[in-house]
Amino acid sequence: MKKISHNIKRIGKIGAGGALLSCMLCLANLAHADRLADIKARGTLVCATLANNEPLGFPDPQTRQIVGFDVDICAAVARKLGVEMEQKSVTVEARIPMLSQGEVDLVSAALGYTRERARLIDFTASHYQNPIKIVVQSDSGLNLVTDLADKRISANRNSTPEESVHRVLPKATVQTFTDTPQAFLALAQGKVDGLAISMPSGIRFVSESAGRFRFVEGALAWEPTALGVKKGEHKLLAAVNQALSALEKEGELDAIWSKWFGPKTKFNIPRDKKLTPIANLR
């Protein structure tokens, strides 16, 4: 009986050891999961874009589908990867958490590069750069960025414009909102003196206001904008960068920009800065 008991204990230890080894192998496989392979296996690239920010991502009046510059960029990258693009709408606040949690494969949602964000996610090369401007009411008497040094300024919460106000105008009072329309409404209702916003997003408010709003002279900062990839997904990051490089060389990035921001649009913003590695912008 003692011998049988000993053997049972020995088998138990071997079983426990085997289970532990299996668990360790499982964790190792998870740690080395390849999202690029997953994307190609499923045949779709799940891409997060904004859904209420013209011309980056907004509902088409006819189809109600989300369209825009960021959506077209995602579709072009997906095509280069040999898969279909699946668009998923996100807010400014949710874009990084959703990427980090693996709910989306790629973020193309007015994602400005910052060192703080780079600790949480990986960035591709910057495919465009825009000035961050301040919109004011035309009769406000405010003409320069420095005129708002101690004023009330609205911005999207956790956005690059918000960060720029804190850095450039530290004495200003910043009021943040979950999306751009709410931040603009605060300005329209006189609850703030200025709206900090990327120039392409701000142009529509200025151009459609019949002269009620304008930009002040100067810029808070220049914002390098890129695509976001989950931290540690090196193969996917390399593949997306390769896709962007090919799209740049083929002139497609310029074509997409011209479609949404070019001279035949109400924005009429030149794409002066081409695809640039983030390392060159730090």
Image (cartoon, rainbow, N blue to C red):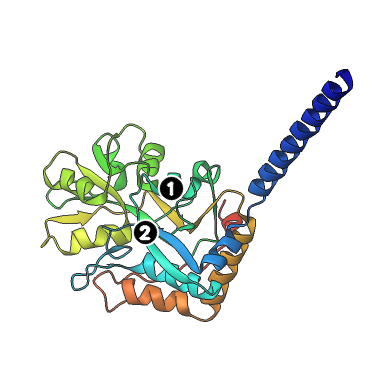
Extreme-front residue of the structure? 1
Residue 7, picture quadrant: top right
The residue wearing badge 2 is: 88
Residue 213 in percent (x, y) is at 16, 55
Residue 88 in percent (x, y) is at 37, 59
The residue lying at 62 percent from left, 57 percent from top is 34
Depth order, front residue of 102/225: 102
The residue lying at 49 percent from left, 75 percent from top is 79
Of pointers 2 and 1, the one earlier in the residue sequence: 2
Query: Would residue 178 be seen by someone viewing this image from the given angle?
Result: yes
Give the left or right position of residue 178, taking residue 75 as reference.
Answer: left
The residue wearing badge 1 is: 98
Extreme-right residue of the structure? 3
Q: Amino acid at mark 1?
A: Met
Q: Amino acid at mark 2?
A: Lys
As helix, strand or loop, the secondary structure at mark 1 comes to helix
As helix, strand or loop, the secondary structure at mark 2 comes to strand
Crowd class of label 1 (few under 14; some 14 to 19; many from 20; radius 10 Å)? some
